[in-house]
Image: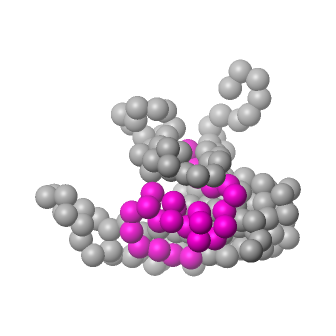
């Protein structure tokens, strides 16, 4: 199995920035990229999960954008949609696809305990058996001294 960079994607600027970073990382390492878009079922007010309502209108364009990025970088790309809890799906896919890295987007969540880290990202960081790269969106901080 080819070493893989796993990316969790959705339709946002932050997720596209993370996807670009994942593809660049894979190109440098000679890895492939596996992108997973997770559709999380909404919760009832009681907290019980309802059956997943999978929004399909943006899936094709998101995966087409990723395919174009991967093709330009000559990086093999596989994609999948999954239903379930985002954190659980991402953690399950690490072993399933042979991921050596996970790449996720930073998120600016009001009231978050840690700036730019949403609850899914925090749990992935906590439980991932492989390194996790958290990528800020294009308008946020960029690497370098003092950032």
Q: Quadrant of residue 99?
A: bottom right
User: Can the viewer see residue 33?
Assistant: yes
Q: Is residue 55 magenta?
A: no
Q: Is residue 105 magenta?
A: yes
Report the number of discs: 0
Horizontal and vertical percent position of residue 52: 32, 74
Q: Quadrant of residue 45?
A: bottom left
Tell me if residue 40 comes above or below residue 112 in the rendering: below
Viewport quadrant of the N terminus: bottom right
User: Which residue is at a point 51% across and 60% down the rendered structure image?
Assistant: 91
User: Which residue is at a point 39% across and 63% down the rendered structure image?
Assistant: 85
User: Can the viewer see residue 107?
Assistant: no
User: Front-most of 40 and 12?
Assistant: 40
Viewport quadrant of the C terminus: top right
User: Front-most of 143 and 65?
Assistant: 143
Horizontal and vertical percent position of residue 74: 85, 70
User: Front-most of 5 and 126?
Assistant: 126
Horizontal and vertical percent position of residue 126: 50, 44
User: Which residue is at a point 24% across and 62% down the rendered structure image?
Assistant: 43
Which residue lies most toward the top here? 146
Horizontal and vertical percent position of residue 135: 64, 45
Tell me if residue 126 comes above or below residue 141 in the rendering: below
Tell me the magenta residue range: 80-107
User: Which residue is at a point 65% across and 48% down the rendered structure image?
Assistant: 131
In the picture, measured across the screen, residue 67 lies left or right of residue 102, that is right
């Amino acid at each position: 199995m080819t070493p893989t960079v796993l990316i969790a994607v959705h339709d946002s600027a932050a997720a596209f920035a993370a996807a670009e970073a994942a593809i660049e990382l894979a190109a440098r390492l000679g890895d492939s990229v596996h992108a997973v878009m997770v559709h999380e079922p909404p919760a009832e007010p009681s907290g019980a999960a309802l059956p997943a309502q999978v929004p399909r209108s943006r899936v094709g364009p998101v995966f087409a954008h990723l395919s174009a990025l991967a093709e330009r970088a000559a990086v093999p790309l596989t994609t999948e949609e999954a239903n379930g809890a985002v954190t659980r799906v991402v953690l399950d896919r690490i072993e399933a696809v042979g991921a050596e890295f996970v790449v996720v987007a930073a998120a600016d969540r009001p009231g978050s305990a840690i700036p730019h880290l949403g609850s899914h990202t925090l749990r992935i960081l906590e439980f991932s058996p492989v390194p996790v790269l958290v990528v800020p969106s294009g308008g946020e901080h960029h690497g370098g001294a003092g950032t």
